[in-house]
Image (cartoon, rainbow, N blue to C red):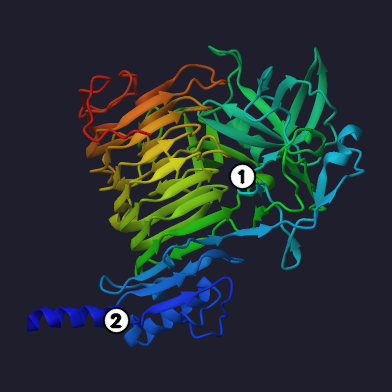
Amino acid sequence: MRESLLYVLIALFSSLTVYPGNIYVSAKNGSDTASGTAEAPLLTVGEALKRAREWRRLDAPEAYDDIRIILDGGTYRQSVPLFIRPEDSGTPASATIITSAPDSKAVISGGVSVTGWTRGTDDKRVPARLRDKIWVADAPMNANRIIETRQMYVNGSKAIRASQFAPGKMERMAGFDISDKSITVPAPDIDLSSAKGLEMIVHQRWAIAILRVKEIIPVGDGNVKVRFHDPESTLEFNHPWPQPIIDGEKGSSSFVLTNALELLDSPGEWYQDYPSGKIYYYPAEGISPDTADIVIPLLETIVNIDGSKERPVKNIRFENVGIEYAAWRRPSYEGHVTLQGGFRLLDAYKLPIPGLPEKAELENQAWIGRPEAAVMVKNASEIDFNGCGFGHLGATGLDYVSAVGNSEVSGCTFEDIGGTAIQIGTFPDGGFETHVPYIPADSSEICSNITISNNLVRDATNEDWGCVGIGAGYVRDITISDNEVCHVNYSGICVGWGWTPLESGMRNNRITGNHIHHFAAQLYDAGGIYTLSNQPGSFITGNHIENLIDAPYATNDRGFYIYFDEATDGFTVENNLCPDDRFGYNRPGPSMVVRNNGPHVSLKNKKQH
């Protein structure tokens, strides 16, 4: 009886305890000069992190258990990235947890509202019949500068940049001339020779290029020749992989012209003028801009978790928090020509005499840059995201860049992502030639022991089609399991980099129990699961892969449920359910085991979606 009474008293005491490590934040009624209690919350997440940092610095009693930064429901707008550093690190017994309050959802946002809309324009670039249908607003300011943007969201949906055709529609090229660095295309229906900011999006096999138009020259036969600005012009015509195809198996490569006020002719489209910054919008039916929630992103990176190898960031956890509205602006300044997976070219060209010491048959060299990301994590461990929502992001969603270990992403939703939803590991960039095997002097540089499980990735790659749902480069001991990846324009889950048969530290990677469907919507040379290079001790098992889309502008039919691209080796691939064994093999190694895959496979935990 006494023992039972003791348990009751302990339970009662625990329920009445206010944990000293709680810091409360409210975007609605907080103040950064307040105490941070439930009754007197702070205003910003940054100030809450600073308070927690001070507790840890002073070894205060509040840091003896978990420190919980509890965000009331609402939007927490960041004008600068939220910077999490080694001094914010927790311990296994005292993590720093950023979480929404019970029964609410907090969103950390890099966005800014666009207000002050007026109906009608007298700009002669807009056809007279449409001028009273166009709404105009001044772009918001950040400090003393106009915010430039390539993304705009109306009531939570991504608006369409003014384009030559309806969304998803393209037109075939007539010629691609390396010698004079031009693309010949059918002449547009309207005169675009003086259009400001005009861009051409080019479909080139497993990637796209975004090229800023320099000049348009009529050449007869109903065609025009288009030339482009540098650096993208030099990159586009010098690099051999990938380039557009003329007169391929299913016709020539395709293109579309975008981003000119002259092209603003369909409901739902928008355009930002330069240098005025004015935003023009032709509202979709039922939308009134003066009452709609219209947002453009200010920040490219919303959260930056950045340690060093000597002092990594540790034990940080995000729970039930939204990360929304991140920008992707770089193509406006330098175009965008990629090698693969959204990795832009810094330099690339065909070798007149093939061969490197590491790869005798190599006939091209390339140096790449990493895409921007809404959340970046470097030199860290135990950095977890549980039950979070990532959305309305222009480039990569979440990126574990390098030297990250023992972390997990679970139960999260990634939706409306311009690039890759989740990216992990080293894709050697800068001055490291990308075909040379990456074997770091310090093996901790390679991301390891990261688990990506039970997440939904949907509508990723919607801006850079050549990105992927979940992408991993040089990694080891990672698990990608029980995720749903769907509605992507290229590949679903990709693991590996380097195009090398050599052992480079990639090993023991597991891709299991995932449901991948509706992939390769625009590009080809794609796989529901796609691998590169030698990864000893790795497994692809128990996945359900279906709905390989017949991409409308692909120039051949190369798409696979699983694609073992160059030098893939070290995998056991079995018990994967797919409509047939449409697998791609590009010089796989001798240690591959591929067995019992296809429509006959029965998955015990087959997901129904």
Residue behind mark 2: 64
Q: Which quarter of the rendered picture does the N terminus lie within?
A: bottom left
Percent position of residue 369, x then y: 52, 47
Tell me the residue at 29%/32% (across/down): 543
Percent position of residue 106, x then y: 50, 63
Q: Nearer the viewer, mark 1 or mark 2?
A: 1
Q: Residues within 10 Å of mark 1 (few under 14, many from 20)?
A: few
Q: Which kind of residue does numbered mark 1 sit on?
A: Ser
Residue behind mark 1: 157
Percent position of residue 104, x then y: 47, 63
- The label number, if any, that marks residue 282 in the structure image: none
Tell me the residue at 52%/39% (across/down): 461
Question: In this image, 290 relative to 443: left or right?
Answer: right
For the residues labelled 1 and 2, say whether their Cβ atoms are less than 8 Å apart. no
Above/below status of 24 relative to 219:
below
Above/below status of 318 relative to 579:
below
Q: Which quarter of the rendered picture does the C terminus lie within?
A: top left
